[in-house]
Image: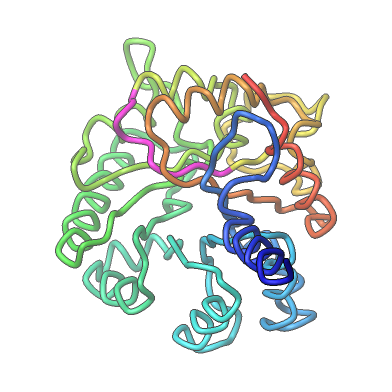
Amino acid sequence: MKFVTAAILTILTTFAGSTPAADGSFEGPLGLQLYSLRNQFKLKGVPRTLDSVKDFGIKYAELAGTYDMEPEKFIAELESRGIKAVSAHFPYTAYKIDPDSVARQAKALGLTYAGCAWADHVKPLNEAQARDIIATFNKAGEALAKVGITFFYHFHGFEFQPYKDGETLADLIIKETNPDQVKFEMDVLWVVFPGHDPVKLLEKYPNRWELMHLKDLRKGIATGELTGKTDVANDVTLGTGQMDWPAILAAAKKVGVKYYFIEDESPTSEAQIPSSISFLGKVNW
């Protein structure tokens, strides 16, 4: 009996975090964008902060730097806690100047995806700048594909500048990048905040979205701004904000999103993350 009980506990521990353990419709796989705990990494250090990630039940991570630790050692710290680094964000300038170097770094880290979370530009974004971004991303996609890694871009809201025929520069970026080598990560907040519908965008480009940032926007915050910026305190626990999560998650599953990462930039992220995980375990559609 003791052996059986121990075996069951081992199985539960192994699979915890891959999918929220509850009766909801969401199946994951669920990870955490580690930028959510950037302040904790600085204050408590890498080992203690990653202990918290493990305690959340998280099995997948998306990186945004390694917090003054050698990358290889950071990955070892993750792996020792049963956490796999699936993807990472690298600076736009690095992709523009030397995408092959980014590819080598991403390969050394054992990543499946390497992306960009913000394309440098002079505000407001215009067509000429968008086309320069497109060229940069196509080169990045080619460089990463050579080493077996998928490049992605994470829209940040400012790309939804009107373009033509009722479309935006975000549409232009999606349409003019190589569909085989350039994929996208939808940060739900950065679609809703500029006034767009995540479900419609997922359905419009069903073969381009492979990653998703799960992030909720505080109720009462006005939408429609194309700044790509809002107070980080407006990131709230999933299910308590403005997002229609059943519709969004159903559409994401339908179009084939492969990994979901909670990203919570708020000052109370460490307290909110467990509640967000609990919500995902219960949400139904």
Quadrant housing the C terminus? top right
Vertical placement of residue 169 versus 89, above or below:
above
Query: Which residue is pictured at 21% across the width and 34% down the height?
Result: 176
Does 208 appear in magenta?
yes
Does 12 appear in magenta?
no
Vertical placement of residue 246 versus 67, above or below:
above
Magenta-highlighted residues:
205-213
> Of 9 and 267, which appears nearest the observer?
9
Question: Percent x, y for residue 70?
Answer: 50, 89
Query: Which residue is pictured at 69% across the width and 32% down the height?
Result: 23
> Of 202 and 83, which appears nearest the observer?
83
Query: Which residue is pictured at 60% across the width and 76% down the height?
Result: 81
Colouring scheme, one of rainbow, by chain, secondary structure, one colour: rainbow
| Identity of the residue furthest to the top in this view | 165
Query: In the shown orientation, is residue 169 left or right of residue 193?
Result: left
Question: Percent x, y for residue 188?
Answer: 58, 34
> Of 82 and 104, which appears nearest the observer?
82
> Of 249 and 213, which appears nearest the observer?
249
Query: Which residue is pictured at 36% across the width and 19% down the height?
Result: 204
Query: In the shown orientation, is residue 240 left or right of residue 134?
Result: right
Question: Percent x, y for residue 134?
Answer: 26, 44
